[in-house]
Image (tube, rainbow, N blue to C red):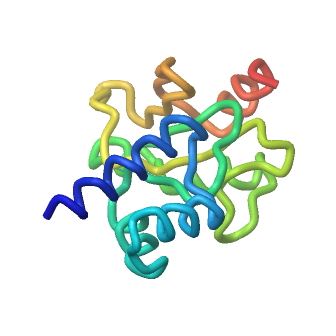
Amino acid sequence: MELKGNLIRRLQKVQTDKGYISAEDINKISEELNISQAHIYGVATFYAQFRLKPLGKHTIKMCRGTACHVAGSLNLVEETRGILNLKHGEDTTQDKIFTIEEVACLGCCSLAPAVMIDKEVFGKVTAKKLKQILDGYR
């Protein structure tokens, strides 16, 4: 059990220091703790707190909770991906300015659909409004 605790702590430290865990980090931890890279990758992908790719300068959290869903959040996510020119499977823009994350709930149901950029919440968001907001972050 101690070995697992050490692995989690090592992954948390790398995540805190760099913002993500690279293949090189997995290799280094594997050698240090004598744990297979496959096991480390499995742990790193199991827990949502870990990322295997760098984040953009700004994180856009798009709510997919019930109220936001009913208010059109799924369409807003797709429109936002288009605004940011994100291809299927990408979550960070080529210029590394934005990373998009879909979240279960932002706790702002009366503002549906809600979006959080870094620590600022925006409500009643439309694609047009979000494009203007994002232009302000560029």
User: Horizontal placement of 57 versus 68: left or right?
Assistant: right
User: Horizontal placement of 133 versus 126: left or right?
Assistant: right
Asked which quadrant contains residue 110, the reply is top left
Q: Pinpoint residue 105: horizontal percent, then vertical percent.
A: 31, 41
Q: Residue at x 45, y 81 (%)?
A: 38
Q: Residue at x 77, y 36 (%)?
A: 97
| Camera-nearest residue between 29 and 70 | 29
Question: How many marks do you count on the picture?
Answer: 0
Asked which quadrant contains residue 2, the reply is bottom left
Q: Residue at x 48, y 70 (%)?
A: 30
Q: Residue at x 46, y 24 (%)?
A: 123
Q: Pinpoint residue 82: horizontal percent, then vertical percent.
A: 75, 54
Q: Pinpoint residue 86: horizontal percent, then vertical percent.
A: 75, 58
Instruction: Identify the residue at the far right of this view.
Output: 95
Q: Pinpoint residue 118: horizontal percent, then vertical percent.
A: 55, 25
| Camera-nearest residue between 66 and 101 | 101
Instruction: Identify the residue at the far left of this view.
Output: 1
Looking at the image, is 2 positioned above or below residue 43? Answer: above
